[in-house]
Amino acid sequence: MKIIEKISEMKNLIRSWKEKKLRIALVPTMGYLHEGHLSLVRKAKALGDKTVVSIFVNPLQFGPKEDFREYPRDLERDKALLEKEGVDTVFVPLAEEMYPSNFQTYVEVTQLTQGLCGAFRPGHFKGVTTVVLKLFNIIEPDWAIFGEKDYQQLKVIQQMVKDLNLEVKIIGCPTVREKDGLAMSSRNTYLSSEERISALSLYKALNLAEELIKRGEKESKEIKKKLKELISSFPYTQVQYIELVDPETLEPVEKVEKPILCALAVWVGKTRLIDNKIISP
Ligand code: PAF
């Protein structure tokens, strides 16, 4: 398995693969890999002749008060996990090369980024789309694989690819959960053992939403109220948002008459967790 830091070196390798007509699948990550990432890697391996995993904690997508500095990092462990999966190349670019001091070009998806996480993390998706476009330009993948846990991110990237006529095919993969249902996230490592119990409130709330909708509840307002009560009954929690939205436009839905996306962001202590589920009436 090759570890590449330099953009020019990565581009040379890609050129040699393209000359041999090899097809490339990319898994962009910020490292501190868990089973969720590894499920994306397995999907990539099944699709492409060559698999590239990028590891880059992208400073551009963190707000000034967010956890860029604390974000967990363990490159040695990540490399060992990827080696075991049979990944061809790990691309670990340096921030100085990705964003030299005169960097001044950004890409922004304007509408899909307004609600949900976008409303609370100004500039976040602009940072995501900018780095993902740079990775696409460096690696020229035929496929790029993303987790559905970051559902809004997946939609925003699909929109960018469509709007900018990129060739890459975007593949979404289902959220991988711990045995008890907690969605896997690198940020789960921040949770104390008491907070870990409260973190399960997101999964429980999504299940409650499904149960209410299956029982015939149509009013978003009612559903959101009940979910908020459930989450708030767990210590250390602070709901940031509970939304029922159209899964394509991400616009809020008042009455549940077709499949909706129920999306949550909850602070558990100092850790912000998100989760979501598509629910059909
Ligand atoms: O989902 C992530 O880990 C990041 O947002 C991504 C897509 C790697 C861009 O930095």
Image (cartoon, rainbow, N blue to C red):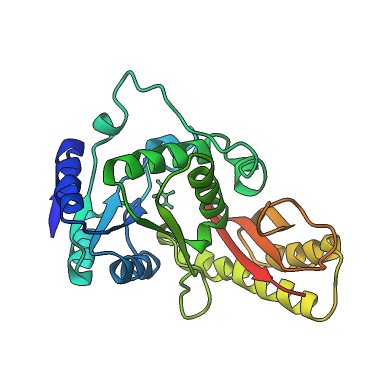
* Residue at point 79%, 67% (across, down): 226
Quarter of the image holding residue 5? Answer: top left
Left or right placement of residue 108 versus residue 45 in this view:
right
In the image, is 110 to the left or to the right of 242?
A: left
User: How far across and how far down the image is residue 238, in percent?
Assistant: 65, 54
8 shown above or below 241: above
Identified at 27% across, 56% down, the residue is: 53
Across and down, in percent, residue 46 comes to 31, 72
Q: Report whether residue 274 is seen.
A: yes
Q: For the point 72% across and 75% down, which residue is it?
A: 210
Is any atom of residue 5 visible in this view? no
| Residue 243: % across, % down | 72, 56
Q: Position of residue 79 (x, y in %)?
A: 19, 60
Residue nearest the observer in this picture, 108 or 121: 108
Q: Quadrant of the N terminus?
A: bottom left
Q: Quadrant of residue 257?
A: bottom right
